[in-house]
Amino acid sequence: MLHLSSRNFEEETGKGTPIIVDFFADWCGPCRQLAPIFEELSGDYKGKLNFGKLNTDENPGIPQKFGVMGIPCLIVIKKGKEAGRIVGFMPKDKLKAEIDRILAKL
């Protein structure tokens, strides 16, 4: 799990392997609910999809750049460009299906 910030965001999201970024805040209840599911899923996609987290309170410019209006917000990024977006909390099976749907289009 990569911990992203304004210092490493562009480098980590500009690579060839896609990355799914969890835009979250510590005060966000649904973000806290999603965190263990997100971490668990990271093991299912080894080599196909990288997983990263970005605290929106500590790095406000990046969510603004991507037009993040609500959290939790998961954005799949490939070579610096958004490839898909999932907004809000969902159970593991639904989240996995959404991730698979986005990856199928890449």
Image (spheres, rainbow, N blue to C red):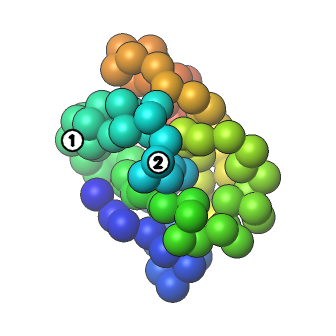
The residue located at (59%, 54%) in the rendering is 77
The residue located at (66%, 68%) in the rendering is 60
Q: Secondary structure at mark 2?
A: loop
79 sits left or right of 34 in the view: right
Residue occupied by mark 1: 43
The residue located at (46%, 20%) in the rendering is 90
Assign the N terminus to one quadrant of the image. Answer: bottom left
Image-quadrant location for residue 85 = top right
Q: Is residue 92 above or below residue 88?
A: above
Tell me the tag on residue 27.
2
Where is residue 78 shown, x and y percent of the image?
58, 56
Is the residue marked by circle 2 packed among few (<14), some (14-19), or many (20+) residues within 10 Å? few
> Can the viewer see residue 57 in this picture?
yes
> Can the viewer see residue 22 in this picture?
no
Q: Which residue is nearer to you in this view: 40 or 76?
A: 40
Q: Secondary structure at mark 1?
A: helix
71 sits left or right of 54 in the view: right
The total of numbered circles placed on residues is 2
80 sits left or right of 32 in the view: right
Q: Is residue 43 above or below residue 87?
A: below
Give the CA separation, mark 2 to mark 1: 26 Å
Assign the C terminus to one quadrant of the image. Answer: top right
104 sits left or right of 43 in the view: right
Q: Is residue 6 above or below residue 89?
A: below
Where is residue 82 shown, x and y percent of the image?
68, 51
Q: Which residue is nearer to you in this view: 25 or 103?
A: 25
Where is residue 53 shown, x and y percent of the image?
42, 57
Q: Earlier in the sequence, mark 2 or mark 1?
A: 2
Is the residue marked by circle 1 packed among few (<14), some (14-19), or many (20+) residues within 10 Å? few
Q: Amino acid at mark 1?
A: Gly
Q: Amino acid at mark 2?
A: Trp
Where is residue 88 shown, x and y percent of the image?
57, 29
